[in-house]
Image (cartoon, rainbow, N blue to C red):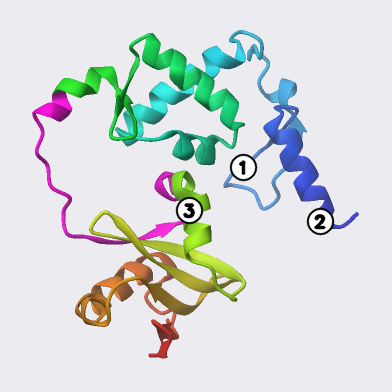
């Protein structure tokens, strides 16, 4: 069988807790083992699905402070009805509170009322596996469509998604273009800061070929 056929099957088995990938950094090959063999003490029926999801969403809210149902669905890749049902119960139980179209931990409400923090001026190139990217992945994929093989990173500027870095990922990222929502003047002002943020992830010696479609 081809790797492209075997790998998706292994990942499905991994998601079902039937196999485990040993990601030991000290060896070249990564072995796969029966999950029960590697984690003999795990009780997969200790919690119901709803109980487990409640625990996950409390941790999710703690990490993100604010989130909405779409973000939870995108990150956990669970059916909308499962997420929505548990969120409603958590509001009734006063674990979560509704706020600005989403949810926060009820314990955080008073703290948020007395906090007047401002989003700092910042430019970040965000890896596709970052939790913020994963939470917004469907929106980002729709917003930043292109003809290149891969989206390498997304650009978070002053707390807002403002662009994507596209190209091809081989052994190292090959950056073809930097897509931006910013007006030309703003993009020009932030150009060096944006390029520096990208180089932090792809390497200082890795060339970036285009910026907003124009050759560098």
Quarter of the figure with the N terminus: bottom right
Where disc 1 sits, the SS reads loop
When the figure is inspected, residue 185 is found, relative to residue 116, above or below; the finding is below
Q: Nearer the viewer, mark 1 or mark 3?
A: 3
* Magenta stretch bounds: 111-133
Q: Residue at x 24, y 17 (%)?
A: 107
Q: Nearer the viewer, mark 1 or mark 2?
A: 2
Instruction: Specify few, some or many for label 1: CA neighbours under 10 Å numbering under 14, 14-19, or 20 or more.
Output: few
Q: Which residue is mark 1?
A: 23
* 100 left or right of 67 in image: left
Q: Position of residue 99 (x, y in %)?
A: 28, 29
Quarter of the figure with the C terminus: bottom left
- N-terminal of the pair, mark 3 or mark 2, is 2
Q: Which residue is mark 3?
A: 139
Q: Quadrant of residue 87?
A: top left
Front residue of 149 and 44: 149
Where disc 2 sits, the SS reads helix
Q: Which residue is mark 2?
A: 3
User: CA gap, disc 1 to disc 3?
Assistant: 31 Å
Q: Nearer the viewer, mark 3 or mark 2?
A: 3
Q: Quadrant of residue 69?
A: top left
Front residue of 112 and 12: 112
Q: Report whether residue 142 is seen.
A: yes
- In the picture as drawn, the residue positioned furthest to the bottom comes out as 215
- In the picture as drawn, the residue positioned furthest to the front comes out as 101
Front residue of 96 and 61: 96
- N-terminal of the pair, mark 1 or mark 2, is 2
Front residue of 58 and 172: 58
* 47 left or right of 1 in image: left
Instruction: Specify few, some or many for label 3: CA neighbours under 10 Å numbering under 14, 14-19, or 20 or more.
Output: some
């Amino acid at each position: 069988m081809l790797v492209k056929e075997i790998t998706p099957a292994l990942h499905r088995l991994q998601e079902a807790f039937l196999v485990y990938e040993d990601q030991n950094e000290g060896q070249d090959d990564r072995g796969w083992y029966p999950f029960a063999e590697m984690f003999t003490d795990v009780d997969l029926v200790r919690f119901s699905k709803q109980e487990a999801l409640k625990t996950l969403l409390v941790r999710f809210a703690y990490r993100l402070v604010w989130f909405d149902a779409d973000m939870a669905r995108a990150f956990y890749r669970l059916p909308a009805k499962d997420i929505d049902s548990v969120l409603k119960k958590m509001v009734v139980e006063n674990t979560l509170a509704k706020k600005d179209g989403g949810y926060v931990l009820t314990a955080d409400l008073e703290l948020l009322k007395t906090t007047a923090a401002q989003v700092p001026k910042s430019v970040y190139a965000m890896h596709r596996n970052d939790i913020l990217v994963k939470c917004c992945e469907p929106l980002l994929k729709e917003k930043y469509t292109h003809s290149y093989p891969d989206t390498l990173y997304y650009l978070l500027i002053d707390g807002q998604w403002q662009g994507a870095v596209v190209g091809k990922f081989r052994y190292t990222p090959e950056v073809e273009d930097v897509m931006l929502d910013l007006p030309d003047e703003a993009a020009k002002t932030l150009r060096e800061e944006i390029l520096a943020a990208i180089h932090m992830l792809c390497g200082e010696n890795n060339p970036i070929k285009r910026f907003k479609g124009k050759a560098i």
